[in-house]
Image: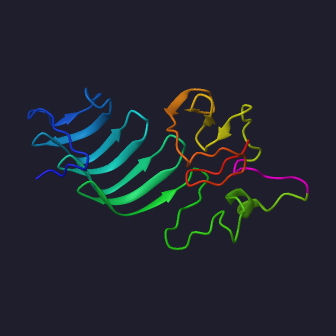
Amino acid sequence: MVRQDALSLRCPKDWTLETGAMEYTGSQYIGEFVDGRMEGDAEYILPTETKYIGEMKDGMFHGQGTLYFPNGSRFDAVWEKGLVVKGTYTFSDGLQYDTENWHYCDSYDRRFYTEICYGLKPAGISQLTNMDPPRKIPPGCYDCGDGFYNPNTRIVKDYNYRFLRNAVLCPLYCSKPGQRTGVFQCHQ
């Protein structure tokens, strides 16, 4: 039985090793097929440029595998039938997310990871983001980590001004500079 909520794709029976773009998803698979399903060591590239390198079984992530994200972060995990059993998320700057003991940028210690590694700036010099110096933010827009949110157009563009996504009108998006939300810490 194939799980409906896990990644599963079929291919023609006579394929054993294939590469190329998948017609319906725009994804690319490099690896072997067994009984028409992706299986074995493989590379799976999504249209968003997120890349999975690891083991597949019955058309799903299964075993050891890593998701590499376009922003440089990664998720190393053990998968079972398309679902994560355990994993570690590492941000592009090397900071690892700890589900049990996470104190990064919380009310007790508001330092950015670069401040933890390299120390605080002298008095009078503020660090507004983990990236120092921060990227220039267009007037009236907000930095949301992977790009800029424009509240007038409700569009997020990357730092090279390429379209990333439409933003849903939602109270989680910030309306004032410095407002903390469940989605991101905003600044102008």
User: Would you place residue 98 above or below residue 169 in this image?
Assistant: below
**Percent of width and height locating residue 40:** 23, 49
* Total marks placed: 0
Q: Residue at x 57, y 69 (%)?
A: 102
- Main secondary structure type of the part rendered in magenta: loop
59 on left or right of 21:
left
Viewer-closest of 23 and 124: 124
Q: Quadrant of residue 75?
A: bottom left
Viewer-closest of 114 and 105: 105
Residue 5 magenta: no
Q: Residue at x 50, y 33 (%)?
A: 165
Q: Residue at x 16, y 38 (%)?
A: 10
Which quarter of the rendered picture does the C terminus lie within?
A: top right
The stretch in magenta equals: 124-131
Q: Quadrant of residue 142?
A: top right
Residue 130 magenta: yes
**Percent of width and height locating residue 80:** 26, 60
User: Would you place residue 86 above or below residue 2 in this image?
Assistant: below
39 on left or right of 153:
left
Q: Residue at x 65, y 55 (%)?
A: 180
Which colour assignment does the render follow?
rainbow
**Percent of width and height locating residue 51:** 40, 42
Viewer-closest of 41 and 157: 157
**Percent of width and height locating residue 162:** 56, 26
125 on left or right of 35:
right
